[in-house]
Amino acid sequence: MKQVRRVLVVRQDKLGDLLLTTPVATALKKAIPDCHITYMIRPFLQDVIQNNPNIDAICYTSYKPRVSEFPHWVWKLRRERFDAVLLCKPRSGAHTWIATLARIPIRVGCSDRYYAKLLTHNLPFDFHHPPMHEVNLMIAMAQHLTPTPLHAERLYLPVLPQHEQQAEELFQMHGMRLAEPFFCVHPGTGGSSHAWYPERYGQVARKLSQATGWRVVVTGGCKEQTLAGEVCQQAGDAAVNLAGQTSVPVLGAVLQRAKLLVSGDTGAVHVAASMNTPCIVVHPVSDYRVREKRWHPWMVPYRIVPATTFCEGCTPLECNMGGHLCRQSISVDAVIESALSLLEELEM
């Protein structure tokens, strides 16, 4: 096998998806120390990988480039003379065409669509019965670039001293002592799945705080400040609302100090996993077993709290996006019990 020197990694979807590709950069740098790795991502995710020592360059793309944009990207990628591209998001049609027209010799991806024939290596993948975790799928893709066996390690989110300092300033601003124990609640999902009820997250926060004696830090994006406020209102005086006040690395610095994260199935779970913080994942949708196998928190203790009743038309593999019966069937007590059970196990 010819040694690859210049690798393009394309991951054009969301925060968690991008974090789940970071073990690829780590593994490739260990196997091929002098290879040059460029990540192609969406601009709003820049700070997720900007200071990653295993990534040499970043370029920006849209989720699905228009055909009119193809000439620009083909010209740009030809100039970079990449030896290989990893099309990490399954069914990346536009980027598969761009990589092919840019004459990148090795094109590794995962697709069941007509353009799959453009890939030099197409990994079979059953989306209803995924054979492996997303990280292992990424490593399997990268294995086509080197005969050296690759091994998946922890997700990597660069948290620098300035990010830790910003987290400390936020704690102090909200009257928290630096050594004060706390857990995090992240009620939003960013549209990746159904969101559980904010009042129930608030009840979980209040009861878990009473059971542990810990403060509650509620996190979220700028568009989730109202949602986080509703959680804090239910949680009581022990809660601190940091929604909209953290970048992703600062969120990482906050979660690094947290005892636990309680969240829906969203990118914050993978940020917590990169910080080695245990997770409780509230999972209303009917296909949680499929999602858990492919998307569970990587290399960190966790519990999934699933729905027990599903909406009409839902099956174990398909959600009809109704989202009411499933969310209602997840009780506050079930989440509390899972959290306390996990914490007790970790103390043993």
Image (tube, rainbow, N blue to C red):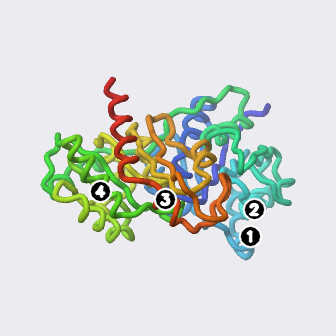
Using the image as rendered, state which of residue 101 and residue 229 is in the foreground: 229
Question: Considering the numbered disc 3 on the image, is that residue within a helix, a strand or a loop?
Answer: helix
Question: Sequence order check: which comes first, mark 1 or mark 3?
Answer: 3
Three-letter residue code for mark 1: Pro
Question: Sequence order check: which comes first, mark 1 or mark 2?
Answer: 1
Density class for disc 1 (Cα within 10 Å; few <14, some 14-19, many ≥20) is few
* On screen, residue 304 above or below 311: above
Question: Sequence order check: which comes first, mark 4 or mark 3?
Answer: 3
Q: Tell whether label 4 touches label 2 (CB within 8 Å).
A: no
* Distance between the alpha carbons at the discs numbered 1 and 3: 24 Å
Residue 71, by quadrant, is bottom right
Residue 275: horizontal and vertical position, in percent? 39, 40
Question: Considering the numbered disc 2 on the image, is that residue within a helix, a strand or a loop?
Answer: helix
Mark 2 or 4: in front is: 4
Question: Sequence order check: which comes first, mark 2 or mark 4?
Answer: 2
Using the image as rendered, state which of residue 253 and residue 291 is in the foreground: 291
Question: Sequence order check: which comes first, mark 1 or mark 4?
Answer: 1
Q: Which residue is mark 2?
A: 93
User: Residue farthest to the top?
Assistant: 348
Three-letter residue code for mark 3: Leu
- Position of 89 with respect to 52 (left or right) is right
* Distance between the alpha carbons at the discs numbered 4 and 3: 32 Å
- Position of 188 with respect to 229 (left or right) is right
* On screen, residue 102 above or below 67: above
Question: Considering the numbered disc 4 on the image, is that residue within a helix, a strand or a loop?
Answer: helix
